[in-house]
Image: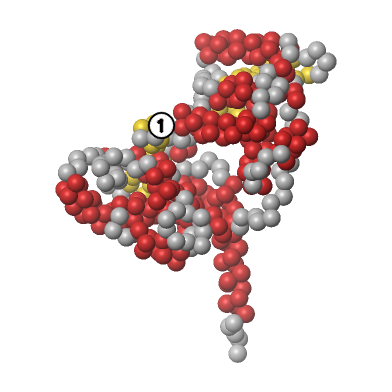
Amino acid sequence: MWIQESRGKLRMYERFTDTDGKVRRVSVPLIKDSPKDRKAAYAELMEKIKIAASGGSEIRYEDLVRKYIDRPEIKESTRATYRTTYKPIGEVIGNPLVSEITTAFVKRKLSECDKSAATKNRYIQSINNLLRFGFEFGYCSDTLHIKPTKVRKVESIEDKYLTSEELAAVLDQMDGTVYFWFTKFMALTGCRIGEAAALTLQDIDGDYIQINKTAWNGRVQTAKTESSERTIYIQDELRAMLMEYMKWRNIHMFAYGIRTDLLFMNQWGNMISAPVYDRYVKTIKSDKRLHAHLFRHTHASLLAEAGYSLEAISRRLGHSDSDITKKIYLHITEKMRKQDEEKLNQIRLIN
């Protein structure tokens, strides 16, 4: 038995030999490294080994999904997302024994349904994640990696963010609404929509905004991750925007008889809802698919274009690690390098 950190969290591990003579490994989360938590984690670890050694592979898909979703460390908002993710997959593949979920089985089931190639690939990724969990926790005796099918249209990294011109065109269509200010705020701070929706006036402290919570389904909960808790500097452009917005906010609250400490609110003074917001931005004309997270990526791209380092961008966004942010940063810096080279070709340094 040993303890090590995995993805920023402690886990307790143990190896055992199954009935086929294979050496396998299981693990359980460890809240903190104390004698009490070690004892509880060890008991859970032994139970998982017992299940795995006595035919844990006979667990069915729906049971494995429940175990995956009901982990205590999972936030309620993430749990809800997982439910909507795995329910339609179950409608396609049924409720087989986990030992029956092979590459051939999944491919056959997906070929029989009328889902798009992109949707099928999302299903494959989710099934891979589920089986990886099942193997790691001892609920199934093996894991597999199903390769996604090729999709004709591959989304470009440029589809992940807006240029400053594209952002201005989007904001012009929102003018006069609270979503204009809300969207501009996300583009100027890189806040996630839940972080921005949960902000109160008390979170603005002089030159900084404190990010220590997020909103989901109209309720406030703790920040998404430990690295999400951060302090955002209010640059001059953001400060000017907030001053203009506060004037608009006071007029709006007086007109509708609203009293609230929320920084941003809907017409009735309630917290802005992510689903409602995403439905709204779909009505805005743009060559790119608009959604709340796009404006967070836009902030990253604008900072990269302004010469910010990847480390500084990640710090402002509250990222411990983000593949998309890295790709955007590398794309922008490569684009700027090529532009500099083209400019160099157009000038003469020595007559």
- Please state if 234 lies on the left or on the right of 54 as rendered: left
Kindly tell me whether residue 153 is visible in this rendering: yes
Label 1 sits on residue: 222
Q: Residue at x 62, y 30 (%)?
A: 90
Question: Residue 328: image x %, image y %?
Answer: 56, 55
Residue at 68% across, 31% down? 93
The single residue placed furthest to the right in the displayed view is: 21
Q: Residue 138: x percent and y percent?
A: 68, 19
Compared across the picture, whether 300 is left or right of 209 comes to right
Residue at screen point 66% across, 28% down: 94
**Is residue 197 depicted above or below 182 in this figure?**
above
Q: Quadrant of residue 110?
A: top right
Q: Nearer the viewer, residue 344 or 159?
A: 159
Q: Amino acid at mark 1?
A: Thr
User: What residue is at 55 percent from the left and 11 percent from the top?
Assistant: 40
Give whichever of 252, 323 is nearer the camera: 252
Is any part of residue 146 visible from this angle? no
In which quadrant of the rendered view does residue 144 lie? Answer: top right
